[in-house]
Amino acid sequence: MITIRVYGILRDSKNRVLVSDEFIRGSYYTKFPGGGLELGEGTRDCLKREFKEETNLDVSIGEHIYTTDFHQISAFNNAQQILSIYYFVHAAEPINLDTKTTLFDFSPQQVADPQGTAEVFRWVEWNDLTEETVSLPIDKITVKLLKEKERFKIF
């Protein structure tokens, strides 16, 4: 089974990138905001919906960055292959989002259930964004591509 995931890279006016720190079934991950494509949905509509659900932000979807071009098993279900699609995202309104400044800054009740899930958002300075900032293999490749594009002034 193939699962399609769509993620957004949101940079703010202070040149920071939004990341999502997540607690999922007893493990901690840092990834880009986004989520799973639903039946009947296009990738851009999926990302708009996910951003609204997760951050309450209305966003417009910009340039395509990357689509997975290799076989990747899901970190959460080894019977699923993941296809991830990344876009730049632009806030359609001022960003008024509750964010944390410390990695995995969850309240005790958010992580009390080892089978539960929790999510908090955090800004990362663009210059501090590295492959090590994010947890998932495809996110790491995306960060590397973003940094290469910047170095060659492609975006």
Image (cartoon, helix red, strand yellow):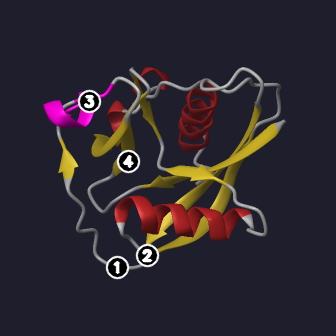
Residue 106, above or below 136: below
Considering only order in the chain, which callout, 3 or 2, is on the residue closer to the N terminus?
2
Badge number at residue 111: 3
Considering only order in the chain, which callout, 1 or 3, is on the residue closer to the N terminus?
1
Q: Nearer the viewer's eye, disc 2 or disc 1?
A: 2
Which residue is depicted at the point 60% across and 26% down?
76
Which residue corresponds to mark 2?
58
Dot 3 amino acid type: Val
Q: Nearer the viewer's eye, disc 3 or disc 1?
A: 3
What secondary structure is found at the residue carrying circle 2? Answer: loop
Q: Are marks 2 and 4 in contact (CB under 8 Å)?
A: no
Left or right: where 83 falls relative to 151 = right
Which residue is depicted at the point 21% across and 50% down?
99
Left or right: where 14 falls relative to 144 = left
Pinpoint residue 143: horizontal percent, then vertical percent. 54, 34
Considering only order in the chain, which callout, 4 or 3, is on the residue closer to the N terminus?
4
Crowd tier of the residue under label 2, counting other residues whose Cα lies within 10 Å: few below 14, some 14–19, many 20 or above:
some
Which residue corresponds to mark 4?
17
Dot 2 amino acid type: Asp
Pinpoint residue 132: horizontal percent, then vertical percent. 44, 20
Pinpoint residue 114: horizontal percent, then vertical percent. 35, 23
Badge number at residue 93: 1
Left or right: where 49 falls relative to 129 = right
What secondary structure is found at the residue carrying circle 4? Answer: strand
Q: Disc count in the image?
A: 4
Is residue 110 part of the magenta span, yes or no? yes
Between marks 2 and 4, how big is the CA–CA gap? Answer: 17 Å
Chain part drawn in magenta: 103-113
Left or right: where 131 falls relative to 12 = right
Q: Are marks 2 and 1 in contact (CB under 8 Å)?
A: yes
Residue 118 appears in which quarter of the rendering? top left
Crowd tier of the residue under label 4, counting other residues whose Cα lies within 10 Å: few below 14, some 14–19, many 20 or above:
many
